Image (cartoon, rainbow, N blue to C red):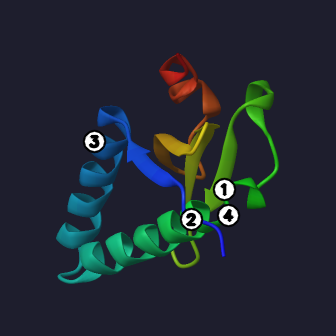
Amino acid sequence: MSVPFNVLISQEAQWDIEESYAFYEAAQQGLGEKFEEDLNTAFEAIADNPKICQLRYKRTIRIVFTKSFPFGIHYLIDGKEVKVIAVFHTSRSPKNWDNRIK
């Protein structure tokens, strides 16, 4: 059994999460919590098997989609770490997070 990768969430991705959490919680009490649970399930999946998603943009970025909400978690693999660079609604353009790749 392999050791899970560390999942590191960038400050920008954390802001994405907080903004979306607040939106869902304002829409319906408890919905923000469900959003967060959905994200945590996806984070666990990529920690266990980060290569499960194919390479996408710039051939370095991978995206895992949440199950219950229309969000993509954009990440890259760096050694034994998964670096989350964005958590965006699927309707948003990749240009919104493109500058986050360093």
Disc 3, SS: helix
Q: Which residue does the numbered mark 2 point to in the structure image?
A: 3
Disc 2, SS: loop
Q: Which residue does the numbered mark 4 point to in the structure image?
A: 49
User: Where residue 11 sits: x, y (%)?
Assistant: 29, 34
Q: Which amino acid type is marked by label 3?
A: Trp
Q: Which residue does the numbered mark 1 point to in the structure image?
A: 50
Binning the other alpha carbons within 10 Å of mark 4 as few (below 14), some (14 to 19) or many (20 upward) gives: some
CB contact under 8 Å: marks 1 and 4: yes
Q: Nearer the viewer, mark 1 or mark 2?
A: 2
The residue under the point 54% across, 46% down is: 82
Q: Which amino acid type is marked by label 1?
A: Pro
Q: CA distance from mark 3 to mark 4?
A: 25 Å
Tell which residue pokes out farthest to the front in this image.
1
CB contact under 8 Å: marks 3 and 2: no
The residue under the point 26% across, 50% down is: 19
Q: Which mark is residue 4?
A: none
Q: Earlier in the sequence, mark 1 or mark 2?
A: 2
Q: Which amino acid type is marked by label 4?
A: Asn
Vertical position of residue 3 compared to residue 9: above or below: below
Q: Is residue 30 left or right of residue 38?
A: left
Q: Which residue does the numbered mark 3 point to in the structure image?
A: 15
Q: Earlier in the sequence, mark 3 or mark 4?
A: 3
The residue under the point 52% across, 28% down is: 96
Q: Earlier in the sequence, mark 3 or mark 2?
A: 2
Q: Quadrant of the N terminus?
A: bottom right
Q: Which amino acid type is marked by label 2?
A: Val
